[in-house]
Amino acid sequence: MAAKQAIHATLVPFARRLMQTGLAWLEQLAAVSTASKDGRADGLRFVQRDPLTGEDYVRIPVPSPEVLDGALRTIAGLLDRFRR
């Protein structure tokens, strides 16, 4: 029972942060999909053009290294608990 509570205590905050990040990303994507009159998209632009090759690519913003490290440590901890 204590192991389940520990997993729950770790998983709930992680899931909450994951949902908040996903929703923020979707809001940014929605802002990008609504182009203004001059043809430029408002907000963050996900599709960029490589200046050297001219090819389009998708640019996905990631959180700061500290946030990313924390999320990866949380995931590693969860996976470690599931292996036991």
Image (cartoon, rainbow, N blue to C red):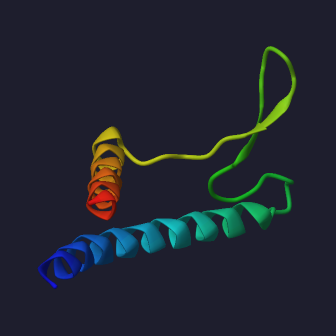
Residue occupying the far left of the picture: 2
32 sits to left or right of 67: right
As drawn, which residue projects farthest toward the bottom? 1
Quarter in which the N terminus is drawn: bottom left
Residue 46's x, y, as percent? 70, 48
Outermost residue on the top side: it is 52
Measured as percent of width and height from the top left, residue 74 is found at 29, 56
Residue farthest toward the front in the current orientation of the protein: 84
Quadrant of the image occupied by residue 43: bottom right
Q: Looking at this view, is 61 or 4 the one in front?
A: 4
Q: Indicate the quadrant containing the C terminus: top left, top right, bottom left or bottom right.
A: bottom left
Count of all numbered marks drawn on residues in the image: 0
x and y, in percent, of residue 83 in the image: 32, 58
Q: Residue at x 54, y 73 (%)?
A: 23
The answer to whether residue 24 is left or right of residue 13 is right
Identified at 47% across, 65% down, the residue is 21
Give whichever of 52, 15 is nearer the camera.
15
Quick check: 43 above or below 47? below
In the image, 35: left or right of 6? right
Residue at position x 87%, y 23% in the image: 54
Q: What residue lies at 33% left-to-right and 53% top-to-bottom?
A: 71
Q: Nearer the viewer, residue 68 or 52?
A: 68
User: Dividing the picture into quarters, in which one does residue 20 lie?
Assistant: bottom left
Quadrant of the rendered image containing residue 5: bottom left
